[in-house]
């Protein structure tokens, strides 16, 4: 019972950390996945899954008014599915990842709605309470972000779980999950390299040096 | 101006000031909250209308907000016209902060954490939080004092520490460590076959080529589908 409450709390606080307050990086896929893995088991696979999603999240950054895709939700759901043994073989992993990517669209859209709700709170505040402290609307914004995490993350997590369980009874192909994670990571590493602001041929030379050193020396 | 007790309180509030983030005034409500707090703690008796005016549009990088607060108070006490500098510094520090914290510090913290995490995931995660939050908390904590001390000249402090170059240095290290992480991961967790390494190289090169052309999420969908096809046709 305690662990389920902890899971709800983690989903809520990670949503707050991402959207409303703290910004202490508890919501980053690598951190969140590992914490869920620590609580419910399979910490290594959760960590590697977080690594893949964080590579994606590092490219899709929240600059200005841009709402980046909710990689916190992606990593939370994948970690829960792995920890609860819903993901058992490689085909389950790929399927779960695909479903989670599809669900990230509605979850991210709720971020936009949350900001509109905050705007509604602000307009009411400016109309009726302009000379009072804005602490209450800030606190409400944080609570909404918390509820969004608890309700939405877990709801879509359950739906993903249901879909994966239904499909895995028809199709289940074994394979090396970690090998495929690093295959996809290679692709995203190409993206991340282009994203890094250091613009020159040196960036690629340094990257290749890292590759070679990792391969030969370590 | 701000005692250590109040500084601690301001620091904690600066962690929640983005709670009402919205499209109308962005972080304006939060800025007003922080400003009100310092006003009360120091009995400055700033006019209510002046305080209420601070609910207007305000947007900056959340980790550098305390610098702007410091500048605001300094200029308010000196000339009584702090809003111009608030506007100027909010956009300047937004650009500087985004470039360092989101584009560089996050990737480098992640890569270091991932590398150490391959040995011990818990250690990796602790390292991630320590590295990132060291910079996050340091800037938030010293921001007010620095802004208040230097006033409208606070940008010279950023120039003195060469803050705009930090991103370049960090990206340089990130590029090296990313290469290290990739080859380590492929070697330790991958399949020891020529086909596998060839496919990984192709994936990397395709990533390089289409990075600026296709949204990363759609690319990820395509890659997952490609892996599915590989799995079905060739097996795991």
Image: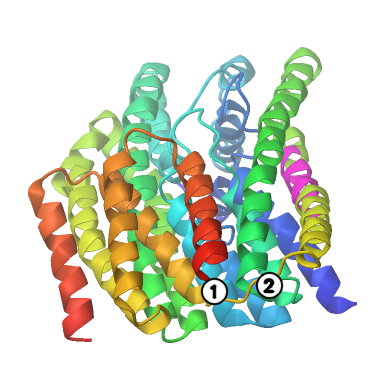
**Quarter holding residue A214:** bottom left
Q: Quadrant of the N terminus of chain A?
A: bottom right
> How much space separates mark 2 and mark 1, taking CA atoms?
11 Å
Residue A82, labelled with which disc?
2
Question: Is residue B132 something that shows in the picture?
Answer: no
Q: Is residue A181 above or below residue B74?
A: below
Secondary structure beneath disc 1? helix
Tell me the chief SS of the magenta region: helix
Q: Residue at x 37, y 16 (%)?
A: B84
Confirm whether the magenta stretch covers residue A143. yes
**Quarter holding residue A171:** bottom right
Which mark's residue is nearer the viewer, 2 or 1? 1
Q: Position of residue A166 (x, y in %)?
A: 83, 61
Q: Is residue A115 above or below residue B143?
A: above
Q: Is residue A181 above or below residue A45?
A: above
Query: Is B76 on the left-hand or right-hand side of B155?
Result: right
Q: Which residues are magenta?
A: A141-150
Residue under circle 1? A177
Task: Read off the chain for label 1.
Answer: A
Q: Position of residue A44 (x, y in %)?
A: 55, 81
Question: Is residue B19 something that shows in the picture?
Answer: yes
């Amino acid at each position: 019972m305690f662990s389920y409450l902890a899971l709800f709390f983690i989903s809520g606080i990670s949503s707050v950390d991402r959207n409303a307050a703290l910004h202490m990086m508890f919501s980053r896929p690598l951190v969140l996945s590992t914490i869920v893995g620590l609580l419910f088991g399979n910490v290594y696979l959760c960590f590697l899954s977080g690594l893949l999603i964080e590579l994606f999240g590092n490219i899709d950054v929240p600059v200005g008014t841009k709402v980046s895709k909710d990689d916190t939700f992606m990593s939370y759901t994948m970690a829960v599915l792995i920890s609860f043994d819903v993901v058992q073989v490689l085909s389950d992993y790929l399927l779960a990842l695909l479903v989670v990517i599809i669900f990230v669209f509605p979850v991210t859209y709720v971020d936009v709605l949350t900001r509109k709700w905050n705007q509604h709170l602000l307009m009411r505040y400016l109309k009726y309470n302009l000379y009072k402290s804005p602490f209450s609307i800030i606190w409400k914004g944080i609570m909404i972000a918390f509820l969004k995490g608890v309700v939405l993350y877990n709801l879509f997590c359950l739906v993903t779980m249901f879909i994966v369980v239904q499909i895995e009874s028809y199709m289940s192909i074994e394979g090396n999950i970690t090998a495929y994670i690093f295959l996809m990571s290679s692709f995203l590493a190409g993206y991340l390299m282009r994203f890094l602001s250091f613009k020159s041929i040196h960036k690629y030379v340094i990257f290749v040096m890292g590759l070679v050193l990792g391969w030969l020396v370590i | 101006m701000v005692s250590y007790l109040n500084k601690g309180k301001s620091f904690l509030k600066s962690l929640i000031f983005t709670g009402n983030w919205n499209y109308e005034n962005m972080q304006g409500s939060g800025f007003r909250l922080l400003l009100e707090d310092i006003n009360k703690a120091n009995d400055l008796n700033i006019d209510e209308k002046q305080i209420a005016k601070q609910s207007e549009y305000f947007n900056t990088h959340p980790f550098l907000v305390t610098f702007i607060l410091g500048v605001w108070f300094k200029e308010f006490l000196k000339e009584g016209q702090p809003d111009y500098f608030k506007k100027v510094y909010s956009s300047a520090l937004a650009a500087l902060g985004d470039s360092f914290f989101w584009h560089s510090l996050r990737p480098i913290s992640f890569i270091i954490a991932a590398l150490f995490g391959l040995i011990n995931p818990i250690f990796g995660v602790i390292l991630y939080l320590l590295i990132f939050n060291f910079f996050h908390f340091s800037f938030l904590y010293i921001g007010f004092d620095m802004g208040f001390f230097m006033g409208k000249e606070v940008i010279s402090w950023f120039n003195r520490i060469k803050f705009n170059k930090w991103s370049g240095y960090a990206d340089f290290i990130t590029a090296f460590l990313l290469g290290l992480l990739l080859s380590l991961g492929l070697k330790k967790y991958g399949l020891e076959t020529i086909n596998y390494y060839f496919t990984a190289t192709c994936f990397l090169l395709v990533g390089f080529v289409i990075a600026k052309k296709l949204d990363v999420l759609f690319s990820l969908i395509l890659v997952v589908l490609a892996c599915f096809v590989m799995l079905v046709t060739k097996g795991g």
